[in-house]
Amino acid sequence: MTSNLHNKYVTFKLGKEYYGLPIDNVLSIEKPSKTTRIPNAPDYIIGLINLRGDVIPVIDLRVKLGMEKIGIDKDSRIIIVREKDIVVGLMVDSSKEVLDIDEENIDKPPESEDDTIVDYISGIGKKDERLVIILNSMRLLDIRSQ
Amino acid sequence: MDLDMNQYMNLFIEEVNEHLQNMNDILLELEKDTTNTSLINELFRVAHTLKGMSGTMGFVNMADLTHEMENVLDEVRNNRIKLNESIVDILFECFDVLDENISYIIENKKEMDSSNKELIDRLRSIVSIDNNNDSASSMENVENSKMNNYVMNVINEASKRGLNVFNIDISLSPTCMLKSARAFVIINTLDAMGDIVYTNPPTEDIEDEKFDLKFSLTLITAVDKDILLSTLNKISEVESIEIEVVESVELEETEDIEHYDSQFIDPKVYKDVNSKKSGDKDKMNKVKKVAKTVRVDIDRLDNLMNLASELIIIKNRMDDLSGTSNREDMLQTIEYLERITTNLHNAVMKVRMVPIERVFNRFPRMVRDLSKELNKKVDLRMYGENTEVDRTVIDEIGDPLIHIIRNSLDHGIEDPQERVKLGKPEEGKLILKAYPDGNNVVIEVIDDGGGIDFEKVKQKSIDRGLITEVEGEKITEKELANILFEPGFSTSDKITEVSGRGVGLDVVKNKIESINGTIELDSQRGKGTTFTIRIPLTLAIIQALLIKLKDETYAIPLSSITEIINVNKENIRSIQEHEIMLYRGKTIPIVRLDKLMGLEMDELTDEYIAVVVRKGDKLAALLVNSLIGQQEIVIKPLGKYLSSIRYFTGATILGNGDVSLILDVNSLV
């Protein structure tokens, strides 16, 4: 009955770490295209892109997670994410694979409160000796849960 | 029976809404003339259809309620009960419940969990208990005789999708002990192979064993006849099975179709003002022929719209190309493409257009209820309901109109006694009028009430410090009318349930401006007030001026631009922090767009290009670096995520594929 999509994650890299987003939330992965700056927008918003006729805002995930900003290179990707009726692109350093991570291999997020990033983490997944930080797209997009 | 009817849900909702609207109209008419038998018959038919439809979809509570309504109406049409106002009131309440229920169904895909017992009891108490049984069984006969339109629609829909539709007549063997259980097995078996859309007798009766040996049902399935037959033959205690293939069915049109057609009026012309006088009997004939509509999923429309917008984008791109390669045939191609895109755009627009009736049709009931509540007599007349407006605009215009109508009833039209004293007819008049005007639609709300006391408005404005006493001396009524649209302004001394303090014209104005519309007010003391609302036919594509700030391109909606002028540096004056300039004898503020958009500004030039924009009566000059030109642009929403970003109404995609932001003039002036 239920699909096993819920334990598939799109993984990507920021710096040295691997991150993951539930595949249900990911619409597509795009190469960076020309962005239009949005005046007076928060610093983590890079701008707007034209995605096949739709206008979509792109977030610099590094800046959003409090990391150092780096330029776009040939590995950079924009992950198009949908949560509720909001669609945004997340700029990441690179994105390569979709991983199956079983629920029992996902730990609760760490409880330290010195880092802004902890707010956005929904769990830490383990797969073949590799740690994948699983992000909570609701909080990432500042959608308040009712 | 648990049918998977989700695929028919949209069809169901659309049709129920049409029938409910019809019911509402009939009830309003019926209230004026409780003896009109054709109206009663019509209402009976509507209730009957609704019952069948909701029963088929498994909405038991709705079916029950309409069943009881039907019983009452049957008694009425057979002259066993005389229709009176209190019965009409109860029927109105039923309508409200049904209406509420259908809204609930739209949101939750299931019906409300209330059996409306109290209402049903009241309906039952109208019909004496003895009659009740009789009429209930006679009702079943009616049902036997024909399937309702709704089922036929479903059948048509199914055969369009290439599914088979079978009428299956089943006779159980006379020795069958548990008829209902046997029938249940058969229904379950068939249910597993497809959808049962109709049974005769109704399923409840089959379950209660209220049938002889035969029953029949209509099945929509992908399975073919032979398989069906062999499966059914495996069930024991079945005497005979007859399977008949149903081709798509002609929809039964209402018998009085000729009447209606002769009454049909060209949609562009609004209804003859005198039609009301032509007598109630006559009027009956035009009580709603269920509109022949093409139902199109709004998503598909949006998709079509997107295609049209892409075409426009390509057109713009080719426009760019033509600048570089100056060939004749290239230009011709562009011209051709341009013609296609314009046509396509218009065609799509037309599909998106819906008659403003969709908004207007809730007003008769509202005015009825309000005038009862306020003890006023009001004659509402509506003209031009067929005027068409884009679907997106329709959704936005309802609330402002409700507000204005409430205001007119509450503060405008006087009490009957007072009207008589003033020598006016006891019954106040409220006119709602819509007509197309170029690329706009004009809606007027006219009442013949007391009008606005501009002296009082002036006094209030002075009291509140909105204007000084000196200004008050020479202020015009037009300017005072504008003050009425300021936040928190009210002239009414009494606070009422209906329209509160009269606060809210500012909300109305905001709402209308948010869809690029305008609102004006014209009032004569003692004679009445007219609100004139002007809204664009559509919101999706606009004419815009593209401008440059440094290397960034922005779009300004052409509709808000007054003029483009050159400004010398010397003509810009600084007063305190604000820069102003003289424009046609008026000082207007200067907005340095580059600074506002967070760009470095350069003071090097002596001359600036200023785009003078207008919001209502206010003007402002936007300084830009250079102009690109005028273009038809497709508005793309910025989306919820960016809802807190100021100064922009949306974005658009330019010919070269780049995204450009559209400036929100309202936030800049």
Image (tube, coloured by chain):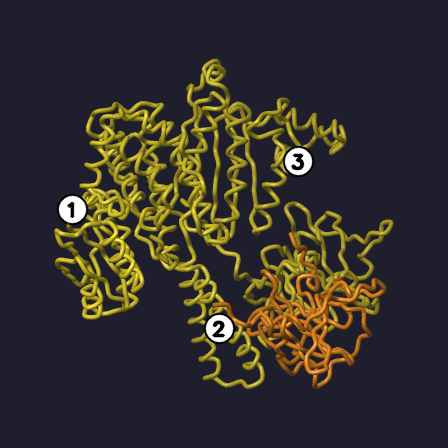
Chain colours: A orange, B yellow
User: In the rendered view, would you say A43 is above or below B110?
Assistant: below
- Give the image quarter of residue B91: top left
Label 3 to label 2, Cα distance in Å? 44 Å
| Residue B527 appearing in the image | yes
How far apart are labels 1 and 3 at the CA level? 75 Å
Tell me if B443 is positioned left or right of B159 in this view.
Answer: right
Marking on residue B212 = 1
Q: Which residue is mark 3?
A: B483
Q: Which residue is mark 2?
A: B311
How dense is the environment of label 1, judged by Cα within 10 Å: few (below 14), some, or many (20 and up)?
few
**SS type, badge 3:** helix
**Residue B626 seen anywhere in this rendered image of the structure:** no
Taking the image as shown, residue B528 lies to the left or right of residue B182, namely right
Other-residue count near label 2 (Cα within 10 Å), few / some / many at <14 / 14–19 / ≥20: some
- Along the horizontal axis of the image, is A115 left or right of B552? right
Q: Are marks 2 and 1 in contact (CB under 8 Å)?
A: no
The amino acid sitting under disc 1 is: Asp
